[in-house]
Amino acid sequence: LFELVESQSWSGCIDHVQKHPKDAKTWTIKKHPDGSLKWRLLPLHAAIINDAPYNVIIALLKAYNDGAKCRENQGMLPIQLARYKNSRFNVVEALINAYPEGGNSNPTQLPFARPSFNKT
C-alpha cells in the first residue's frame, strides 16, 4: 500500500485498501545508515505528503479511522501535515471529521511556517 501511495497510483491505492484494509494500519519506517530513525509514516501520512485526492484519503480513513490520531516521527498529526501541505479543503475537513480534537492543534507549534488552507 505504501508503495502505491508513494508512486501516486491512486486507483491502485483505493483498490488495495478496500481489499486489504489492515494495510492502512501498517507503519513504514526508514532508518539512517547508523540505524537511527529517519522517518515513520502510516499510509495516511504518506498520502497527505503526496497530495492524494480526497477519495484516497476517505478510503484510508474508512480502513483505519484512528490513523487520523496517529503522529508521525516528528510528532505531526495528519491534519497538521495537511495544513502544512496546503491540502484541499475537503481533505482537511475529512481529517477534522475523523479526529475533531486534531483540528485544535496549534499550527504555530509546528516545526514549519504557519500553513494556510487551499480551498480549491
Image (cartoon, helix red, strand yellow):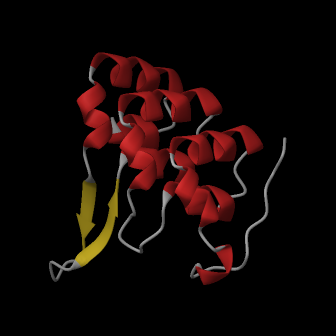
* Figure check: 67 above or below 81: above
Q: Is residue 86 left or right of residue 37?
A: right
Instruction: Find residue 88 and report its image quarter.
Output: top right
Asked if residue 81 is positioned above or below residue 21 in the image, the reply reads below
Q: Is residue 19 left or right of residue 5?
A: left
The N terminus lies in which quarter of the figure? top left
Residue at the farthest left position = 35
Residue 51 at least partly seen: no
Q: Quadrant of residue 62?
A: top left
Question: What residue is shown at x 54% (from left), y 58% (from top)?
Answer: 101
| Nearer the observer, 81 or 13 | 81
- Kindly identify the residue that appears in the image at 39 percent across and 63 percent down: 71
User: Can residue 12 be spotted in the picture?
Assistant: yes
Q: Residue at x 52, y 41 (%)?
A: 98
**Residue 119 image offset from top left, x and y in percent:** 84, 45
Give the percent coordinates (x, y) of residue 86. Answer: 73, 57
Image quarter in which the C terminus is found:
top right
